[in-house]
Amino acid sequence: MSDFNPKYQIDNITSKIVAGLERISEAYKVLLWEKAKLLSLSPIQIQILIFVKYHKQDLCNVSHLAKEFNITKPTVSDAIRVLLKKELIIKTFPSTDSRSYAVQLSVSGKKIVEEIEHFADPIKQQINALSTQEQNNLFKPIYELIYKLNQAEILTVQRTCLGCRFYDKKNTKPYCNLLEKELKDTDIRIDCEEFQLKKV
């Protein structure tokens, strides 16, 4: 039985959650498309621009961006070609191999990102209306789901604490060996700059 069958959802909380997450993903698409139409950019071009602003150069190349957004390298290359043409990004060559390049924002790109990076604010406003306890209760299943989807090879990339080599358990409690501190649920990061993949 399909999780998207309303009759099946009536007595199945798992199906309700799956259908609910699908509706939330639609909200992100709608908000992205609104910005995209205003600026004559595609949603993936907007996502790339925002990602490049906040991540290290070694993550801002075609190969990694394809993994990050679970799309093909040709799709990323096409998006980058358009962004280069619009002069919103520039190529950098961090290695001696001239075929291997990364991208960074141009001055125009930085200005555009300031206009678009708050596209999800309508969703944030709804979350802000929740109590602190409700937000805390919501956050843990989200970061655990992201990690599990990565382990199931559905999400190619994750940088949450749970998959990091610095993450540990001390006296059954989460602990970060890099920060040398015990972690509360609210300390867990979704996208950690210091993340290093845990070796299996």
Image: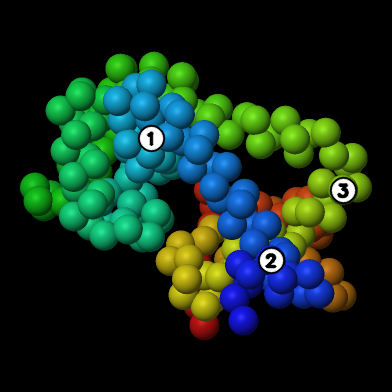
Q: Amino acid at mark 3?
A: Glu
Camera-side residue of 52 and 13: 13
Q: Is residue 52 above or below residue 166?
A: above
Q: CA distance from mark 2 to mark 3?
A: 26 Å
Query: CB of mark 1 within 8 Å of CB of mark 2?
Result: no
The location of residue 21, given as percent across then percent down, is 64, 57
Q: Amino acid at mark 2?
A: Pro
The location of residue 185, given as percent across then percent down, is 80, 57
Left of 32 or right of it: where is 148? right
Q: Which mark is residue 46?
A: 1
- Furthest-left residue in view? 98
For marks 2 and 3 on the same chain, the one whose residue lies earlier in the sequence = 2
> Residue at coordinates 46% horizontally, 35% vertically from top-left?
32
Left of 83 or right of it: where is 159? right
Query: CB of mark 2 within 8 Å of CB of mark 3?
Result: no
> Residue at coordinates 56% horizontally, 70% vertically from top-left?
149
Q: CA distance from mark 3 to mark 1?
A: 30 Å
Snapshot quadrant of residue 91: top left
Residue corresponding to mark 2 = 6
Q: Which mark is residue 146?
A: none
Snapshot quadrant of residue 46: top left
Q: How is the image coloured?
A: rainbow
Q: Amino acid at mark 1?
A: Ile
Q: Which of label 1 and label 2 is nearer to you? A: 2
Camera-side residue of 189 and 114: 114
